[in-house]
């Protein structure tokens, strides 16, 4: 089993809010105000997180992209009425694929 380093995505709690939405895209332009439409945004992946202010990727978000690359994550606060804030945006280079093992090797007497 290869060693894959996980990522802990965290955010500051918002008073009187218990639910957050985490959005992911490889395209920064999706988060521009004229393009961002929360869950209805074409080409965006999202996940609801309730009762906590962190997410361990990929363990807690198995649908997170496996393709290595720079991804933008937006976190919004969602109240009981379904109202949702603008996103707090961060970016990170993600790579959850290990390199291949050496193809040749051996043990020799010296």
Image: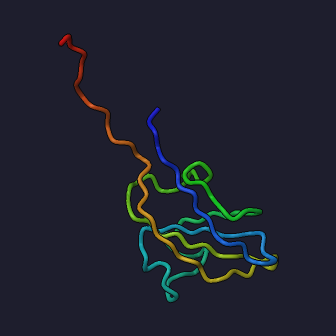
Residue in the image at 62% along x and 65% along y? 10
Residue 12 x/y as whole percent:
67, 72
Which corner quadrant holds the C terminus?
top left
Q: Residue at x 54, y 81 (%)?
A: 36
| Left or right: 101 as drawn, with respect to 39 | left
Which of 10 and 109 lies nearest the eye of the viewer? 109
How many callouts does the rendering have? 0
- The single residue placed furthest to the left in the displayed view is 110
x, y percent for residue 32:
48, 84
Q: Is residue 38 left or right of residue 99?
A: right
- Of 62 and 70, the residue lying toward us: 70
Quadrant position of residue 81: bottom right
> At 41% from the left edge and 61% from the top edge, which residue is drawn?
93
In this view, the residue farthest toward the front is 110
Q: Nearer the viewer, residue 8 or 20?
A: 8
Task: Residue at 24%, 18% (x, y): give it.
Answer: 106
User: How is the model colour-coded?
Assistant: rainbow
Q: State the image coordinates of residue 4 (x, y, percent, origin top left).
A: 47, 44
Q: Is residue 102 left or right of residue 58?
A: left
Residue farthest top in this picture: 109
- The image quarter in which residue 53 lies: bottom right
Residue most toward the bottom?
34
Picture layout, residue 2 above or below residue 90? above
Which of 54 and 110 lies nearest the eye of the viewer? 110
């Amino acid at each position: 089993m290869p060693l894959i380093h996980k990522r802990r995505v965290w955010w500051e709690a918002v008073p009187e809010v218990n639910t957050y939405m985490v959005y992911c895209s490889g395209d920064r332009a999706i988060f521009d105000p004229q393009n961002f439409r929360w869950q209805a945004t074409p080409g965006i992946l999202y996940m609801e997180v309730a009762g906590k202010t962190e997410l361990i990727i990929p363990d807690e978000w198995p649908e997170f992209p496996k393709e290595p690359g720079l991804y933008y994550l937006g976190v919004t606060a969602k109240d009981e009425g379904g109202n949702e804030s603008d996103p707090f945006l961060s970016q990170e280079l993600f790579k959850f694929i290990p390199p291949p093992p050496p193809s040749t090797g051996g043990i020799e007497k010296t």
